[in-house]
Each structure stands twice: as structure tokens, then as C-alpha cells.
Amino acid sequence: MSALDFSPSPTPRVLLLGGTREASLIAQMLAAQGTDAIFSYAGVTHAPLAQPLPVRVGGFGGVQGLVHYMQHESITHLIDATHPFAARISDNARAACAAVGAVALLRVERPAWQPRSNECWTQVPDMEAAARSLPQAPTRVFAAIGRKQLAALAQHAAQHHYLLRWVDVQDVDENTLKNIGLPNAHIVPLPLRAASHTVQDEIALLRQHRVQWLISKNAGGAAARLKLDAAHALGIQVVMVQRPTPSVAPPARFAHITQPAEALAWLASA
Ligand code: NAP
């Protein structure tokens, strides 16, 4: 259904589910036009970006918790600008809006990467398939995947040497990784919000760690693509994990956009 099919609500009050660059951009736009809105973080990082909106942190307690929160806060519009791989909260947003009925839902999801004509990726449906697609003989893998998916590597491909990269490096050390079954892993910090980070930096990292394979989630976005460009420049094989598909049907009042700038037009019409 198009965003323009809805009758405008008199006084919008927005709940914005964040944790992405797109959510931060929308927060700036909502704040600039004085929209009544609340920004929500899951609380997974220690120092999330400051936002120009009131911020709440932490899970809602599943679908029922989100329903209760939206009713208690008199939310009229829910904007789900969470990460393409944050499947559970997106499913919860769909289910909660279907349950409440009066709340319109906007999904903001950046486009997935497509391989360029000279790139060749092994496309796999999930992290288990990614782990199984690595060679049997020990090799050196940059697993750009986040902490939640490490079990798949430990279960199916523990023989490799892994380079891992995430925001809060202090949360998981290499001993912890040994305990979950990844004895050969090295963790480096993600260069968060560093506009100056370039493909040359990514090439230097891959060279330094003599990476031969890259596992990436198809997150989309320009900054995160630098590692793919670097892998291509060095002839490193890429395993691309496709995005999860929603397991909950969208509610009646639903729209999907890829560009944060379209959110205000939706809000004006939904
Ligand atoms: P997830 O698996 O979909 O969600 C797990 C639980 O975290 C949800 O059920 C919900 O708890 C809570 N949650 C998630 N996002 C929330 C938000 N914005 N506000 C309040 N509660 C939230 O999500 P995930 O993959 O762990 O990602 C967590 C957060 O990190 C998301 O906000 C996402 O945008 C961001 N992020 C994720 C990735 C990734 O690769 N997955 C990458 C970059 C950023 P309740 O059920 O209790 O409500």
C-alpha cells in the first residue's frame, strides 16, 4: 500500500526504532520540524550516538511490551529504521502495529548491495551456509558479522583463523572466543562514524591480517561497502549472507522506503 493512501492523523507522535545511520538522519529531520517523537535504542552498544529527540533504551518485552508501550505513550506512527539484519524487532513492529491497528508503520531499509559486473560473490541464505561454504583446509577469514552469529562459525568452521571487528571490543575478548570454540580469532575495533575511513584503510587491514576470505552480511550502505571494494582489489573471495525476510505480514497501514528523506512525506500523509 502506498504511503499516500492514508488519511493524515491530527497530532502525530512518533516512535523511531533506531540503531542505524538512517534512524539518526530521520531523528534530525523530525527534530528540525518539531515533530513529537521518541527515539528508541536496543541498548546493545555502550556509547550510542546522542540524538536530538528524547531517547529511551532497551527492549520493550516482545510484541506485547511494544503494544503496551505504544498505547501508554499514545504513539500514532512507528518508524522502524533498524538494521536490515535486526529481524526480530522488525517482526515485532509489524505484529504490534497489526495488534494496535491505529498505529501506522513505516519500514526504512537501505538498499541491499548488488555485486558489480566484475565482482563475484558466493551468495548464501544464512550464517550456517556461510560457514559451510568456506574451504575445509584452515584459511584466514575476515568475518564481518557481529557477535550474535559467532556460534555458526564455531559449529561449522572452527578450524580457520578469524579476523573479527565490532564496536565494543571490550565486551568479548579472545579467551571468550576460545571458550565458544573459536581458538584462532583476532578482534579489532570498528572505525565507527569515521568519515575519513577509506578503502585504502580496508586494504591495509586485509593485508595486515593476510585475509583470504571475507564473510559479509548484505547490510547495504556506502561506508560498510568499503571492505567489499578492498576485498575485490586484493582478489579475496567474498561470501555474502543475504538478508532475512520478515516472518510476520505487514499491518494494514504500512509503507516501505529506502531513503530516510522520504520519511517526512510519509508522516505528513499517513
Ligand atoms: P533483533 O535481533 O531484531 O532484536 C532483538 C531484541 O532487541 C528485540 O526483540 C527487542 O527486544 C530489542 N530491540 C532491537 N532493536 C531495538 C530498538 N531499536 N529499540 C528497542 N528495542 C530493540 O536486533 P539486533 O540484531 O540484536 O539489533 C539490535 C539493534 O542493533 C537494533 O536496533 C539494530 O538496528 C542495531 N544494529 C543491528 C545490526 C545487526 O547486524 N543485527 C547491525 C547494526 C546495528 P524486545 O523484544 O524486548 O522489544
Image (spheres, grey):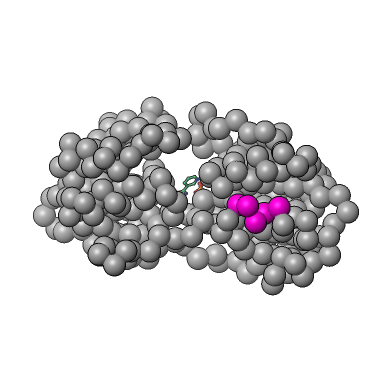
- Residue 205 on image: x %, y %: 24, 38
**Can the viewer see residue 172?**
no
Question: Can residue 154 be found in the magenta stretch?
Answer: no
For this rendering, which residue is in front, 71 or 26? 26
Question: In percent of the image, x 53 and y 44: which residue is there?
Answer: 21
- Residue 217 on image: x %, y %: 38, 54
Left or right, 33 with reference to 229: right
Question: In percent of the image, x 51 and y 37: which residue is there?
Answer: 44
The quadrant of the rendering that contains the N terminus is bottom right
Question: Can residue 261 be found in the magenta stretch?
Answer: yes
For this rendering, which residue is in front, 40 or 232? 232
Identity of the residue furthest to the left in this view: 137
Give the mark count: 0
Left or right, 48 with reference to 194: right
The magenta stretch spans which residues? 260-264
- The chief SS type of the magenta part is helix
Question: In percent of the image, x 51 and y 51: which residue is there?
Answer: 83
For this rendering, which residue is in front, 207 or 248? 207
Identity of the residue furthest to the right in this view: 10
